[in-house]
Image (tube, rainbow, N blue to C red):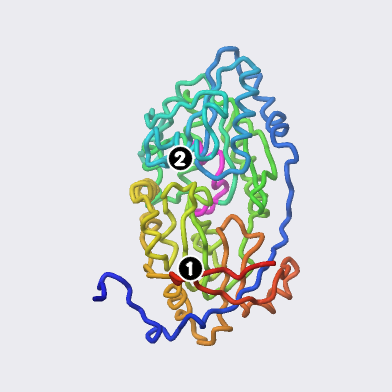
Amino acid sequence: MNNPTHFQLTEAQAGVGPQDVPSFFRVRQKFERPREQDVPAAVRREVAPFLGRVQAGQRIAITGSSRGIANLPRVLAECAKALKEAGAEPFIVPGMGSHGGATADGQIGVLAAAGITEASMGVPIRSSMEVIQVGTTSTGFPVFQDRNAAEADGVLVVNRVKPHTGFTETVESGLCKMLVIGLGKQAGASRIHQQALKIEMGRMVLEASKIILESVRPRFIGGLALVENAFHETALVQGIALDTHEHLVAEESRLLVRAYELMARIPFEHLDALIVDEIGKNISGSGMDTNVIGKKPGLATPQIGAIYVRGLTEATHGNAVGIGHADVMPRRLLDEIDLNATYMNVFTAKALRGGKLPLLAEHELQAMQVLLNFRQDPEVDSVRMAWIRNTSELDELWASRALLDEVRAHPRLEILSEPLPVSYDAERNLIAPPLG
């Protein structure tokens, strides 16, 4: 007997069978690729000016992030080493808002999954969700800071500078956001996002970060900003003095412009459908980067008819935030989703859409039946479809046959294979064409 809670779309109803799948060819994108050749040396160089502000025996907090930041363990370890050589007693605090299920142990686990442990860093990790209030915004909301950081003798703020997935402003995701959201822990992140329901999030980050820098505690010795290239490599390491908010904003804004220039993108302005193998918090704060899939407010391109997400990264630990940006997902993916981690994240961010579930396909043939029905031209070879691993690894991707001429004419694209057929396994799951 058919289960009425399962999607029972048939081949006859969809007009799409196993044979009605577009062929795909492999494409390589050519991106600008600046790199720091010696990341530890770059960290030493940029942190050196801050060491004169440290006295022997002082306890200095270093911020650890939940993001999938390139070389982050090496960066934090080198910061800790430099501080210890200066006579300080450094430790790491998780700067990650509500991530890790908004628990102290959960945030330690997130750091450990990224290779950041007390053993690997050679310093303690002090994790707590306790906060202190350091000020109040002009709209009457409290601004919080991590108690461990606030009670330390100094704080070194470390974060990647990149385009944010939810707003556009002078500064987006970077040191200012780490001050407000990361060091604000769940309480601070939730309150700031709550304000952003009525006031632009970018304005809130700017105002709250100014309040934090001008408060008595925490005491900041400096900031270390990281910029990545399209290959998820460290392109730039820069120390930024945090003596004034104006200086921080000016320097971070300049780095944000560079981050936009280096950001990987999908090379097509219009697609009927996009297949994404995996999403996760280590890929983007929104699971999949809204700058890449055209879901960021204010973006005109790319325009994508429907998005199919196939799975989660292991490093996201079941946090499926961003799944709401998808239109279709396999039912089996439900077993991988940690609803508490996902819901705590979207609750704190006040972005409930990010946790909504898309249409559940019983198998991937059915997912393709759905995707191929949401376009005007019924011919299989006319479908404009791309297939990517995730939104941070876009140097190579699959593209459907209909995009062949467009790719040939693009100066930054290289064709790596002829159009090849897609197949399904015994469970009707997609098998990508073999290469080589």
* Main secondary-structure element of the magenta-colored stretch: loop
The circle drawn on residue 181 is 2
Classify residue 282 as left or right of residue 362: right
Is 15 situated above or below 216? below
Q: Nearer the viewer, residue 410 or 197?
A: 410
Q: Residue at x 62, y 42 (%)?
A: 252
193 drawn magenta: no
Query: Would residue 315 be visible to someone looking at this image?
Result: yes
Q: Quadrant of residue 348?
A: top left
Classify residue 33 as left or right of residue 298: right
169 drawn magenta: yes
Is 194 situated above or below 299? above
The circle drawn on residue 285 is none
* Disc 2 to disc 1, C-alpha distance: 29 Å
Residue hosting label 1:
307
Residue 389: x and y, percent? Answer: 56, 60
Of mark 2 and mark 1, the one earlier in the sequence is 2
Query: Would residue 195 be visible to someone looking at this image?
Result: no
Quadrant in the picture for the N terminus = bottom left
Is 3 situated above or below 225? below
* Structural crowding at the residue carrying mark 1, measured as other residues with C-alpha within 10 Å and reported as few (<14), some (14–19) or many (≥20): many
Q: State the residue lying farthest toward the front.
A: 426
Stretch in magenta? 164-181
Q: Amino acid at mark 2?
A: Ile
Q: Quadrant of residue 391?
A: bottom right
Element carrying mark 1: strand
Q: Residue at x 54, y 23 (%)?
A: 123
Is 431 situated above or below 90? below
Residue 374: x and y, percent? Answer: 45, 79
Q: Amino acid at mark 1?
A: Ile
Element carrying mark 2: helix
